[in-house]
Amino acid sequence: MLKNIEKAIRLFIPKRMNNYSLYLSSLKHKSGIEIGGPSSVFSSAGFLPVYTVIDRLDGCNFSSNTVWEGSITEGYNYKYENKTGYQYIADGSALDMIPDKKYDFVLSCHSIEHIANPIKALKEWKRIIKDEGFILLVVPHKDQTFDHKRPVTSLQHLLDDFETNKTEDDNTHFEEVISLHNIAMDDGIDNIESLIKRTQDNIHNRCVHHHVFNTPLVVKIADNLSLKIIDVQHFNPFNIVILLQKHKDKPDNKHYLNPSNKIYHNPKFPSDKIW
């Protein structure tokens, strides 16, 4: 009964993330691109309603047919809120068709974990935003998802994947996914057989989480790429939300690189205490 009442209330008063106004003010009246969207998180009913304040948004999806969006076509077909932008069909780590510094910001919600080479992707996203531009990431925290049995990917592993130019047909983590995936927490599959089939066909469906993230890893990735960390926080049940800014000089992120920072002591995310 109480859950139904809360659900009804949220139709009129959406639950918002703490300090969400900082994110909205940073992107207000700006133009950007979303990788792997559109996302309900950024809608007027979402916890971070970015779509309501931006001027323009293009989108990028890896295929003309995806598990999440169904059938899509390249062109002015990217629908977000009640607006339309340009839809690119391309891998998020290969945006050669987009010139340097085209956009004010990049949005990505639950997308980076599906990319085999996250450092390559983030370097691309950094390339296509202007100086002082923003990257807004929402990343699933492994402790509260079906990845909770898997070890956190190390930064060095991601850097090695970049150096060896891992591509989207990489199957390095398939055995780990199949053996440690919590099927009961995944609405997309019913049993181990369907998990194996989906995983082996990842080049077409892109459902695999190649890497798993906790808050320290996301912060260390940002610092390694010389992105200034504007804010980091969690939103229930499993979201890491981080706002980053592109700078010419190496930013000082020591506040967020300190393991004693309160962000790493949320009891819901015990792996954050392991640096």
Image (cartoon, grey):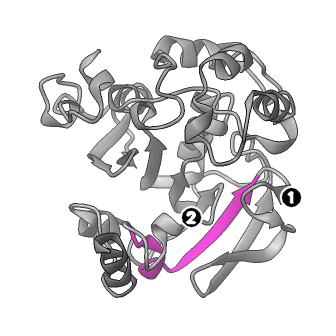
The kind of residue on which mark 1 rests is: Asn
Decide whether residue 55 is among the magenta residues: yes
Query: How far across and down, in percent of the image, does residue 183 sit?
Result: 62, 34
Direction from residue 82 to residue 252 in the image, left or right? left
- Residue at which label 2 appears: 39
Which residue lies at the image location 47% right of the left edge and 68% below the top edge?
Answer: 42
- Quarter holding residue 251: top left
- Quarter holding residue 13: bottom left
44 and 243: which is toward the camera: 44
For numbered disc 1, what is the local secondary structure? strand
10 and 101: which is toward the camera: 10
Q: Which residues are magenta?
A: 48-61
Direction from residue 50 to residue 21 in the image, left or right? left
- Residue at which label 1 appears: 65
Query: How far across and down, in percent of the image, does residue 122 sit?
Result: 56, 38
Is 50 located above or below residue 239 in the figure? below
Direction from residue 141 to residue 102 in the image, left or right? right
Decide whether residue 85 is among the magenta residues: no
Which residue lies at the image location 57% right of the left edge and 55% below the top edge?
Answer: 101
**10 Å crowding of disc 2: few (<14), some (14-19), many (20+):** some
Cα separation between marks 2 and 1: 16 Å
Are the residues at dot 2 and dot 1 in contact (C-beta closer than 8 Å)? no
In what quadrant of the picture does the C terminus appear?
Answer: top left
Which residue lies at the image location 76% right of the left edge and 40% below the top edge?
Answer: 206
The kind of residue on which mark 2 rests is: Ser
Q: Earlier in the sequence, mark 2 or mark 1?
A: 2
Which residue lies at the image location 46% right of the left edge and 19% below the top edge?
Answer: 152
Query: How far across and down, in percent of the image, does residue 232 sit?
Result: 28, 45
Is 154 located above or below residue 8 in the figure? above
